Amino acid sequence: MADASGNIEAKNYGFDIPVEKKSFFLKGLDNFDWGIKDRMSRIFDVKSGKTVMLAFDHGYIMGPTSGLERIDLGILPLVEYADCLMCTRGVLRSCIPPDVNKPISLRCSAGTTVLTELNDECIIDIEESIRMNASAMAIMVSVGGKYEATTIRNLTKIVDLGMKYSIPVLGVTAVGKELARDSRYLSMASRVCAENGAAFVKTYYCEEGFNKVVAACPVPIVIAGGKKLDEDKALEVAYKAISDGAAGVDMGRNVFQAQDPIAMIQAVRAVVHDGAKPDKAFELYNDLKK
């Protein structure tokens, strides 16, 4: 205990200095708990307000797809350039060294593979996310699909648990074969995730009206990379999404399946954090590739 005697009397009360009231740097999160804000501050760069997430959770539905045959060879060289890693608990334990010290967006829902149609999804135990020190929990939500109710129920359940332990939830909008990736659908799917408590949303970019998708979502949106594109086209998509208000990207195949994945993720960073235009980012990619 501090000694009762010999203390210097307090006197610096700053009466003439008003207490600074700060707003959180990510939209829609001012009223979230301190722990959630702390974790979101690890995922998103405080200066740019953006994030470059590296998604390599594809194996839980696709198996060893191209670029993910060996996580140690295909992913570990990219980790230092990512702001956040999105993966499953199995790969995290088996392949990602704990000392990389990167925030983790843990894939917390699972169900079917590409061999079948979307079926009943389940969620992993919240204790698993706590054990793995997850900075976010990623949950798939299939708005408009056959199992819409199941996936929304999963989202609400994991949000309740996340609020209890101050772990934010990433709502991942799933687009089935029968659903169009247009602004009307993406706005609805993203808004449903946010309305049910997701702290941020992962959805697809669309050419027409994506600014409306972002504006209608009260929390940050990051875009999914989707199918593999040519490197210049992928950089263009990232630039357009950021220009329309997206708070970052969560790319997978467009990074680890690129001709030079290390050069590609650095070019993506230039777009997201530095505002580089697609042509300049592609020049950077080619320079780094050399």
Image: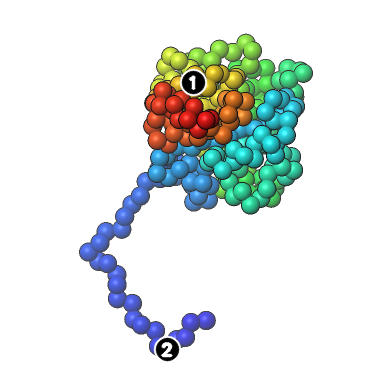
Report the front residue among 103 and 3: 103
Q: Residues within 10 Å of mark 2 (few under 14, many from 20)?
A: few
Report, in whole angstroms, how far the alpha carbon at label 1 lies from the one at label 2.
Answer: 69 Å
Residue highlighted by disc 2: 5
Three-letter amino acid code at the position of disc 2:
Ser
Three-letter amino acid code at the position of disc 1:
Asp
| Residue 53 appears in the rendering | yes
Q: Residues within 10 Å of mark 1 (few under 14, many from 20)?
A: some
Residue in the picture at 61% in, 22% down: 174
Q: Quadrant of residue 57?
A: top right
Report the front residue among 280 and 221: 280
Report the front residue among 255 and 128: 255
On screen, residue 126 versus residue 288, left or right, reads right
On the image, the x and y values in percent for residue 220 come to 46, 34
On the image, the x and y values in percent for residue 30 come to 42, 44
Tell me: residue 34, above or below residue 217: below
Direction left: furthest residue: 16
On screen, residue 19 versus residue 31, left or right, reads left
- Disc 1 and disc 2 in contact, CB within 8 angstroms: no
Tell me: residue 14, above or below residue 89: below
Residue in the picture at 69% in, 30% down: 68
Residue highlighted by disc 1: 232
| Residue 28 appears in the rendering | no
Residue in the picture at 63% in, 16% down: 176
Number of disc labels: 2
On screen, residue 262 versus residue 20, left or right, reads right
Which circle's residue, 1 or 2, is located before the other in the chain? Answer: 2
Direction front: furthest residue: 290
Q: Secondary structure at mark 2?
A: loop
Residue in the picture at 27% in, 59% down: 18
On the image, the x and y values in percent for residue 157 come to 64, 37
